[in-house]
Image (cartoon, grey):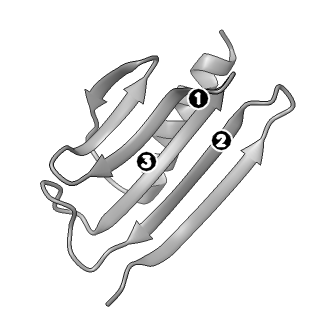
Amino acid sequence: MKAQKITEHKSIEADGSIIQFVIWKVPTPVPPTEHGFKYRLVYIRNGERVVGFDNERGKGDHMHLDGGEYPYQFQTIDQLIEDFLSEVEKRRQS
């Protein structure tokens, strides 16, 4: 089985910021994760990443918030998107 794209989204907001994400179902988990998904979600404002959620080989699930990198506990795709959009909304209100 090859990687299968589950969802993809990109929007350019009225203030010029970008919300973009793509999620794939992969045949084998990306080490050290144990789930079968590869994902990248990002919120860019003024050309800089403000919020990012992703998983990569060797690092696993993590998030980028305001220039810092933190572990992320993946549960489900729906929860991932909800958590991402929640972090984006916090920063859009400030």
What is the crowding at mark 1: few (fewer than 14 residues within 10 Å), some, or many (at least 20)?
Answer: some
Are the residues tagged 2 and 1 within 8 Å (C-beta)?
yes
Query: Horizontally, is 8 left or right of 18 in the view?
Result: left
N-terminal-most mark, 3 or 1? 3
Residue behind mark 1:
88
Q: Quadrant for the N terminus, please.
A: bottom left
Q: Which residue: 42% across, 18% down?
A: 67
Tell me the quadrant of the picture where the C terminus can be found.
top right
> SS at mark 1?
helix
Distance Cα–Cα, label 3 vs label 1 = 12 Å
Q: Amino acid at mark 2?
A: Ile
SS at circle 3? helix
**Residue 83: percent from the left, percent from the top?**
46, 38
Q: Which mark is residue 19?
A: 2
For the residue marked with disc 1, what is the amino acid?
Val
Is tag 2's residue or tag 1's residue first in the polypeptide sequence? 2
Residue at image coords 59%, 34%: 43
Residue 76 vertical position relative to residue 60 in the rendered view, above or below: below
Q: Percent position (x, y) of residue 88?
A: 58, 29
Q: Secondary structure at mark 2?
A: strand
Q: Is residue 2 above or below residue 82?
A: below
Farthest right residue in view: 14
